[in-house]
Image: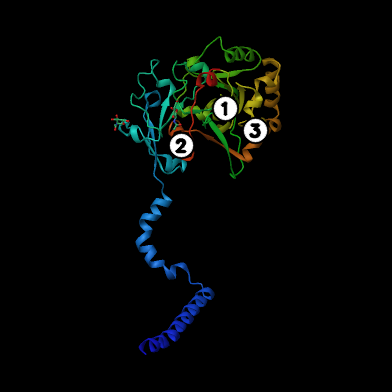
């Protein structure tokens, strides 16, 4: 008796429950409540602080500077403020060696017997970066570096971490005004080597046109304060590199470009320069069969303001950004490490750089 009566009550009850569940399901389908209405306050209050941090702020990349470049110290806490590169921790604290994602070495500060490199075993995840901004001519080869590094940082376009001496950045700035000129050709030189190509070119060129020379090479040192105004006051500036190598295009080009003088370049080929700056922003020594013809062209430009102004056409679209030694190199390296987790070995440094 009791069994039949209880099942008699259960059946309509079950039916009612199914109806109710169906009704609620339909209601939720038609009036999709916002996520926050269902889980919101709970989720915000209990999950947010920790979960959000883990997702939005992955663990920081640690880059250890093993040797201060040329012994000069600089501020290491600049990646975020100066270059908008976040989540990087730059340090020179060697106690952090074991947990550093990468260690960076400035070539010119490595002893020839490599005795100032880390003696400890290298953690399996850690990458060693070879950093050098000098040309091969001014970089002494050190035996034993061939299989030591994982990545190269250099001005060369084919370096793993490519950091040129400067770059042109798109701009919407107002019209550029060419600074007023009081001299035709200028050159500021600190190191003089009479055997070098650039010294020979200068000697020939000055037979045909006046060149204002400054710098310790000529016993006419120029103060930091006078540096920029001096270059700006010259129509042309001799951007002669100290040695000729692929992609070796330094501040000698970017200074006059930034200050409103037309660079006359001596370095790699015109085509190579055109990888970095527009072809009508500079004059190349190879554009003319000899310094005499170059001088004739410069004298023509000196008399024709309209022709001269053509060398500044690019200023309408671009502005010069010079690379910040050494903070920028460090920050770019850290960014690279943070975004490139792949295994990499540099096993041909000698042939790659000194070839
Ligand atoms: C780093 O790890 C090595 C072993 O891989 C250990 O011998 C050394 O003491 C550690 N150094 C520091 C500073 O923790
Ligand atoms: C870095 O290079 C060395 C050899 O130079 C190699 O033994 C090591 O496994 C490499 N590490 C990574 C993370 O690529």
Comparing 212 with 108, the one in front is 108
Task: Tell me which label, 1 or 2, sits earlier in the chain.
Answer: 1
Circle 1 SS class: helix
Mark 1, Cα crowd under 10 Å, few <14 / some 14-19 / many 20+, is many
Q: Write down the residue under mark 2.
A: 337
Q: Is residue 344 above or below residue 189?
A: below
**Residue 316: mark in rendering:** none
**Residue 321: % across, % down:** 53, 36
* Callouts 1 and 2 close, C-beta under 8 Å: no
Circle 3 SS class: loop
Q: Write down the residue under mark 3.
A: 278
Task: Tell me which label, 3 or 1, sits earlier in the chain.
Answer: 1
Q: Write down the residue under mark 1.
A: 253
* Residue at image location 59% in from the left, 13% down from the top: 197
Q: CA distance from mark 3 to mark 2?
A: 31 Å
**Residue 348: % across, % down:** 52, 21
**Residue 188 can be seen in this image:** no
**Residue 62: % across, % down:** 38, 37
Mark 2, Cα crowd under 10 Å, few <14 / some 14-19 / many 20+, is many
Kindly indicate the quadrant of the structure image that contains residue 87: top left
Q: Quadrant of ligand 1?
A: top left
């Amino acid at each position: 008796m009791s069994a039949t009566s209880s099942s008699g009550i259960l059946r309509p009850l079950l039916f009612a429950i199914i109806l109710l569940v169906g009704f609620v399901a339909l209601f939720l389908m038609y009036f999709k409540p916002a996520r926050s209405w269902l889980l919101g306050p709970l989720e915000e209050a209990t999950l947010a602080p920790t979960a959000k941090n883990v997702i939005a702020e992955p663990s920081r990349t640690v880059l250890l500077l093993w040797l201060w470049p040329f012994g000069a110290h600089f501020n290491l806490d600049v990646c975020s403020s100066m270059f908008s590169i976040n989540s990087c921790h730059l340090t020179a604290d060697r106690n952090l060696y074991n947990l550093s994602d990468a260690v960076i070495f400035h070539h010119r500060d490595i002893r020839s017997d490599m005795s100032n490199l880390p003696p400890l075993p290298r953690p399996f995840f850690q990458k060693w970066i070879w950093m050098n901004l000098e040309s091969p001519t001014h970089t002494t080869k050190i035996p034993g570096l061939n299989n030591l590094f994982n990545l190269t940082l250099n001005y060369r376009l084919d370096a793993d971490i490519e950091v040129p001496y400067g770059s042109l950045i798109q701009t919407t700035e107002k019209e550029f005004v060419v600074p007023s000129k009081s001299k035709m050709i200028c050159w500021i030189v600190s190191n003089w080597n009479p055997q070098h190509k650039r010294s020979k070119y200068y000697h020939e060129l000055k037979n045909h046109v006046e060149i204002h020379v400054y710098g310790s090479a000529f016993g006419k040192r120029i103060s930091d304060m006078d540096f920029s105004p001096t270059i700006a006051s010259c129509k042309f500036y001799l951007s002669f590199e100290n040695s000729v190598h692929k992609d070796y295009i330094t501040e000698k080009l970017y200074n006059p470009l930034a200050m409103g003088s037309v660079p006359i370049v001596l370095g790699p080929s015109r085509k190579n320069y055109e990888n970095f700056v527009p072809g009508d922003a500079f004059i190349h020594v190879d554009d003319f069969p000899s310094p005499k013809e170059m001088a004739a062209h410069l004298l023509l430009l000196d008399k024709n303001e309209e022709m001269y102004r053509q060398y500044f056409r690019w200023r309408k679209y671009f502005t010069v950004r010079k690379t910040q030694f050494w903070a920028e190199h460090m920050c770019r390296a850290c960014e690279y490490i943070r975004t490139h987790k792949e295994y990499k070995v540099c096993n041909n440094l000698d042939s790659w750089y000194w070839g």
